[in-house]
Amino acid sequence: MRFLGIDLGWTSGASGLCCLGWSAGCLHLLNLERRQPTEDILGWVDHWALANQGAIIAVDAPTLIPNETGMRLPDKLTHRYFGRYHAGCYPANLRRPFAQRTVAFGLSLEARGFVHAPLIVAQQQGRFQIEVFPHPAMVHLFKLNRILKYKKGKLAQRYSEMLKLRQYILEILPTLEPSLNFAASGHLDDSGLPEIPVSGSALGSALKAVEDQLDSLICAYVAAHWWYWGIERNWVLGDATEGYIIVPAPDELGD
């Protein structure tokens, strides 16, 4: 199985892309990058999830939007369960300017055989797609009291918070089940993660590039967590009719 994470640019921005592979009982980082045109992103999907290969694609974007106005059920549920962590998601409806792009992207994945999987048999082979949202996932995976605020604010704060995210990925994901083994990634720095820039004339855009990639890695990990555990250790916020978001459940033993 392979697990693809896509931090989709909702309008025309670049998208972070991550592919994790499963072998020898753990996950391995196979690819981490950014692409922009939809055709290039789908070409990347075709390369890393071959037609005869099992894969789950986790997309950070609303690919199912049944409502003309207002908020979807999963959007409301993120605010109910994660609002106190500042992790409620942006409301989606068909009148939003991004709706056509995000829904069309989900349909393009369906045309490639990736069916929506708001329910799954743990460790089942197949080709699936799910919607995810990195902030609530990180709240549970990293046991945060609030989200890491690396997306907005002053550059110094974004840098500091992104540094925490990178460190949590490197230190915590290898300790979870399924484990992400960076040591076997084959990269010279033993992780394959992009370095976080400290300065430069285009520091804001450079931080955004790292942000997209780290978000896509979280998406890919959530895909693997969903495949590995199913509903035993994951929450499903919503359903296939009203839209849904998959979130790893909190570690009850550690809470």
Image (tube, grey):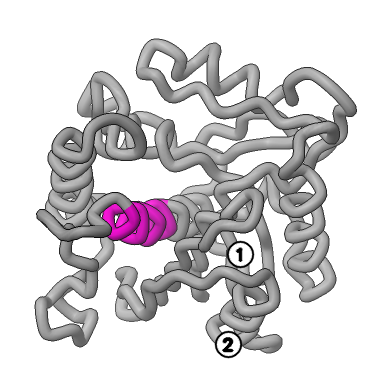
Q: Assign the C terminus to one quadrant of the image.
A: top left
140 up-or-down from 100: above or below: above
Task: Between residue 168 and residue 251, name the one nearer to us.
Answer: 168
Task: Identify which residue, 77 or 93, lies in the foreground.
Answer: 93
Residue 65, percent across and down? 80, 38
Q: Which mark is residue 47?
A: 2
Give the CA separation, mark 1 to mark 2. 22 Å
Q: Number of numbered discs present?
A: 2
Q: Is residue 196 left or right of residue 216?
A: left
Considering the numbered disc 2 on the image, is that residue within a helix, a strand or a loop? helix
Left-right relation of 55 to 136 = right
* Mark 1–mark 2 CB contact (< 8 Å): no
Q: Identify the residue shown where x is 63% and y is 71%.
A: 37
Residue 107 or 155: which is nearer the viewer?
A: 155
Across and down, in percent, residue 181 comes to: 22, 69
Instruction: Please say if 50 is above or below 18.
Output: below
Q: Amino acid at mark 1?
A: Gln
Which secondary structure is most common in the magenta stretch? helix
Query: Does the stretch in magenta take in 210?
Result: yes
Q: Residue at x 27, y 32 (%)?
A: 148
Measuring 44% from the left and 39% from the top, which residue is drawn there? Answer: 248
Point out residue 137 in the picture as x, y percentages from the top left corner.
Answer: 41, 38
Which kind of residue does numbered mark 2 sit on? His
Q: Earlier in the sequence, mark 1 or mark 2?
A: 2
Residue 97: x and y in percent read: 76, 40
Helix, strand or loop for disc 1: loop
Q: Is residue 19 magenta?
A: no
Numbered range of the magenta stretch: 205-218
What residue sits right under mark 1 in the picture?
124
Query: Residue 184, can we see it?
Result: yes
Disc on res. 113: none
Observer-side mark, 1 or 2, equals 2
